[in-house]
Image: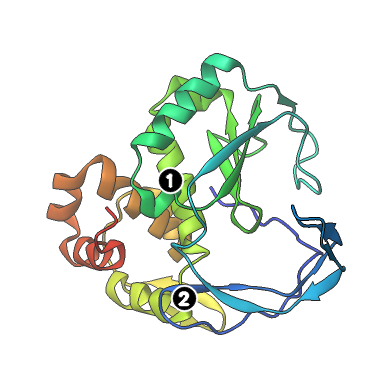
């Protein structure tokens, strides 16, 4: 499930980016020294469009303390034990690169979500995934794919999102998304197009035959988006 993670660091306005790219909003950069000793002054990095497959190889980092500005203060975070870290790392290596070539990924472990029946959540703009205890008693790979799909959604261009709305029969009226189809890969897909997208990516990889049979047009759209990166 996607949580709205408030980021005061970035501007509210996003770039309109071409297909295959996503917006990086302007943000301050601290001064630093290069390896050769050259000093680079602090500045404000201008907004630009980045290809969503160009963030480099995955570098997962398991962290202990609660993320800053986390919207659920009652949630109790804890250390991701070595055994759980090994499970997650093994799963990440088995997932297609279209979902994992995102550079640095922060992973946290917590006891229980404030949201009922929620095994995990994410903050796409910060590349954060939080795994609750229950996620390790379920199909953990399926859960991680779902959260990574939310990250992928945040990196699709406006044109790609619109094409998804069209094929999955979502329409926008007065800033409210309304669906016009009878069935969903998971019931909470009715909550909005992003959750629907994450569910469909999840089932595309974990139950491909059933998904293709039930949602052939969406299946074809996902194949086109993934290209050779499945």
At x 41%, y 81%, the residue is 159
At x 58%, y 44%, the residue is 105
Distance of label 2 from label 1 (alpha carbons): 19 Å
Q: Is residue 172 visible?
A: yes
Q: Which mark is residue 222?
A: none
Q: Which element carries disc 2, helix, strand or loop? A: loop
Residue, disc 2 = 157
Q: Is residue 170 visible?
A: no
Q: In which quarter of the view is residue 29 placed? A: bottom right
Task: From the top left corner, tell me how far across and down residue 181 is, in percent.
Answer: 28, 67
Say above or below: 150 vs 58: below
13 sits left or right of 143 in the view? right
View extreme (front): residue: 36
Residue, disc 1 = 146
48 sits left or right of 53 in the view? right
Task: From the top left corner, tell me how far across and down residue 46 is, in percent.
Answer: 72, 79
N-terminal of the pair, mark 2 or mark 1, is: 1
Say above or below: 205 vs 90: below
Q: In which quarter of the view is residue 216 placed? A: bottom left
141 sits left or right of 130 in the view? left
Q: Which element carries disc 1, helix, strand or loop? A: helix
**Label 2: few (<14), some or many (≥20) within 10 Å?**
many
Mark closer to the observer (2, 1) = 2
Task: From the top left corner, tell me how far across and down residue 109 is, in percent.
Answer: 64, 28
């Amino acid at each position: 499930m996607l949580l709205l993670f408030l980021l005061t660091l970035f501007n509210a306005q996003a770039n309109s980016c071409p297909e295959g790219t996503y917006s990086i909003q302007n943000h301050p950069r601290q001064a630093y020294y290069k390896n050769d000793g050259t000093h680079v002054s602090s500045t404000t990095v201008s907004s630009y469009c980045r290809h969503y497959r160009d963030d480099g190889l995955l570098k997962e980092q398991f962290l202990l303390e609660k993320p800053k500005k986390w919207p659920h203060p009652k949630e109790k975070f804890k250390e991701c034990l070595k055994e759980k870290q090994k499970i997650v790392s093994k799963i990440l290596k088995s997932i297609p690169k279209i979902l994992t070539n995102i550079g640095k990924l922060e992973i946290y472990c917590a006891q229980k979500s404030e949201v009922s029946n929620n095994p995990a959540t994410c903050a796409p703009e910060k590349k954060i995934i939080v795994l609750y205890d229950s996620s390790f008693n379920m199909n953990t790979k399926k859960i991680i794919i779902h959260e990574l799909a939310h990250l992928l959604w945040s990196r699709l261009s406006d044109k790609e999102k619109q094409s998804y709305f069209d094929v999955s029969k979502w329409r926008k009226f007065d800033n409210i998304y309304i669906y016009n189809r009878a069935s969903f890969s998971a019931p909470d897909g009715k909550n909005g197009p992003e959750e629907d997208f994450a569910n469909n990516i999840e089932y595309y990889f974990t139950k491909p035959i059933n998904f293709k049979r039930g949602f052939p047009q969406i299946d074809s759209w996902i194949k086109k988006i993934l290209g050779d990166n499945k």
